[in-house]
Amino acid sequence: MTDHAYNFAYLDEATKRMIRRAILKGIAVPGYQVPFASREMPMPYGWGTGGVQVTAACLTPEDTLKVIDQGADDTTNAVSIRKFFERTGGVETTTHTSEASVIQTRHRIPEEPLREGQILVYQVPIPEPLRFLEPRESETRKMHALEEYGLMHVKLYEDIARHGEISTSYAYPVNVEGRYVMDPSPIPKFDNPKLGGNPAIQLFGAGREQRIYALPPFTEVVSLDFEDHPFQASKADHDCDLCGCATSYLDEVITDDRGGRMFVCSDTDFCESRRSAGHRGRLSPEEMA
Amino acid sequence: MRDFKDTALLQVEGLTKRYGARIGCADVSFDLWPGEVLGIVGESGSGKSTLLSCLAGHLTPDHGRVLYQGRDTLAMNEPERRVLGRTDWAFVHQNPRDGLRMGVSAGGNVGERLMAVGARNYGAIREAATDWLARVEIDAGRIDDRPRQFSGGMQQRLQIARNLVTGPKLVFMDEPTGGLDVSVQARLLDLLRGLVRDMGLSVILVTHDLAVARLLADRLMVMQGGHVIEHGLTDQVLDDPQAPYTQLLVSSVLQV
Ligand SMILES: Nc1ncnc2c1ncn2[C@@H]1O[C@H](COP(=O)(O)OP(=O)(O)OP(=O)(O)O)[C@@H](O)[C@H]1O
Ligand SMILES: [Mg+2]
């Protein structure tokens, strides 16, 4: 199955070494954005070339890879990246979170708690959390260096002033180990509490912006907020209509053109595992007799 | 006799800044006392902005020393200087666009310095912003509007509120009333005078407008070609100018 025209996992060894150095530096300085020389990948930038390069640099032939896109294993994006590594690395792939040693993700953290030894690789479109209010790269770099993060709260202030609450619901900024402010990539803020104290290694790759950053296992991660507007990890106020789970992150799905809709787990592997274990939701097919 | 070295807020010694062969400002020395407003006047290109930028740490002078409360600000590292820049010091730009965040609401603009020094209570920040908008005569109902929706005079008042909200001791101002029409200028000057008095601010005010200097400044420095050519109490300098250049400057204004 492996395509021998390429080096293992597509990238040449020198490039992988360069990326690994950036990853190690990122792990040594949690939350700090390490520049790296991003390579052209045989896919468009929007497809997570940063994540793909980080994954390529981490993979060994013994690894088992899972790829998710907004929680799902079966979107075009997820399927393509999985196939890419099957072809160029010959690695095992899986859809089960617990069986994977490396998980590349776009916009979600799996529901099933990760364990020590696993690596979670995030695809990052915009790594700079201060970009919103300060477009000058020279200035944002200085602000990180000098820990001048008042501007992050200006953004949250603007949210509350305009919407009555902190309306930022994706890419919600966090402070890492009381030092660097970090953009956790566009995961829903529901996932933010899983960033901290996580036994897995979390790596973030931004291809177009050429940045890698990392959270080593069991890092302290705090979501920014105000005393009188504390951070809340919110989700739709429903249970999953397929597996009945009351605590998972839900996608709203339109089911017909008469306004019918349902809420289902965004993490498809999680939902399927629950269903095969016998859990049922509001719209589950009737029990077979 | 009191010991001046112990009480001056700012001591400036031999400050010189060149742009290549051209002189920006040359060998400028003075002391600034707490609660004092020092006006810097002179024609276009005389070095007023260069001097102000060197004092505020935006430009690095070639020679000289700037001591703030006895601390050498040029020997400070950048983090220390930036902390000073958002706590004890404030800088009001001639063009409010240079001193405001145009994409952020009026309340956010005023609140930024508070958040920069650690304020984390939304209600308290909002209250302080509301209070400061009132002090600069901006209607509280405009707190969520962007500066773009404000007139030039309002933008300038907003910039002043944004700078004064953390209660700085020393304010640098570069032509704060420039670019505004006369009636708007007069109102702003009144406002500034009140704030300076109420807060006991020390101010270094750059202006080429002697009427502004007369109204706000306790003391004046007159600059020409980068040098300070006359220095004294405002009334003295304006009513009895010594240097021929100052005499020319004063007479040309008084004829208006
Ligand atoms: N960035 C620069 N590069 C080169 N020369 C400069 C620069 N800035 C100012 N100068 C020169 O330094 C001298 C002093 O300029 P400065 O801007 O300080 O004057 P000013 O008194 O503030 O004038 P104005 O009233 O027009 O604002 C002038 O000769 C000017 O041309
Ligand atoms: Mg000037």
Image: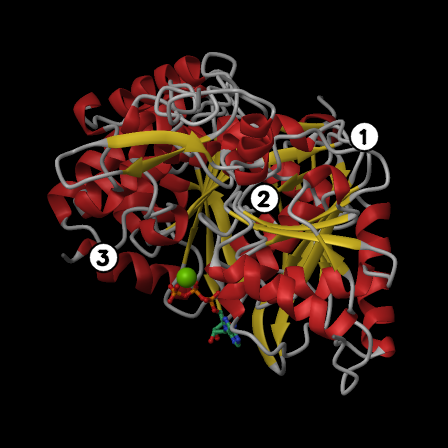
Spatial CA span between label 2 and label 3: 56 Å
- State the residue position of label 3: B253
Q: Residue B181: x percent and y percent?
A: 14, 50
Q: Is residue B88 visible?
A: no
A271 left or right of A163?
Answer: right
Observer-nearest residue: B62 or B42?
B62
Above or below residue B182? Residue A57 is below
Chain hosting mark 1: A
Residue A137 falls in which quadrant of the image?
bottom right
Amino acid of disc 3: Val
Q: Residue A202: x percent and y percent?
A: 74, 44
Spatial CA span between label 1 and label 2: 18 Å
B74 left or right of B26?
Answer: right
Residue shown at 45%/16% (left/top)?
A229
- State the residue position of label 1: A218
Badge 1 element: loop
Observer-nearest residue: A23 or A43?
A43
Residue B169 falls in which quadrant of the image?
top right
Chain hosting mark 3: B
Specify the quadrant that holds the C terminus of chain B. Answer: bottom left
Q: Residue A12: x percent and y percent?
A: 82, 79
Asked whether disc 2 touches disc 3, contact meaning CB atoms under 8 Å apart, the reply is no
Q: Residue A47: x percent and y percent?
A: 53, 64
Amino acid of disc 2: Asp
Residue shown at 43%/36% (left/top)?
A155
Q: Is residue B141 visible?
A: yes
Callout 1 and callout 2 share a chain = yes
- State the residue position of label 2: A183
Front tag of 1 and 2: 1
Q: Which of marks 1 and 2 is nearer the N terminus?
A: 2
For disc 1, does the CB lie below 8 Å from ligand 1? no
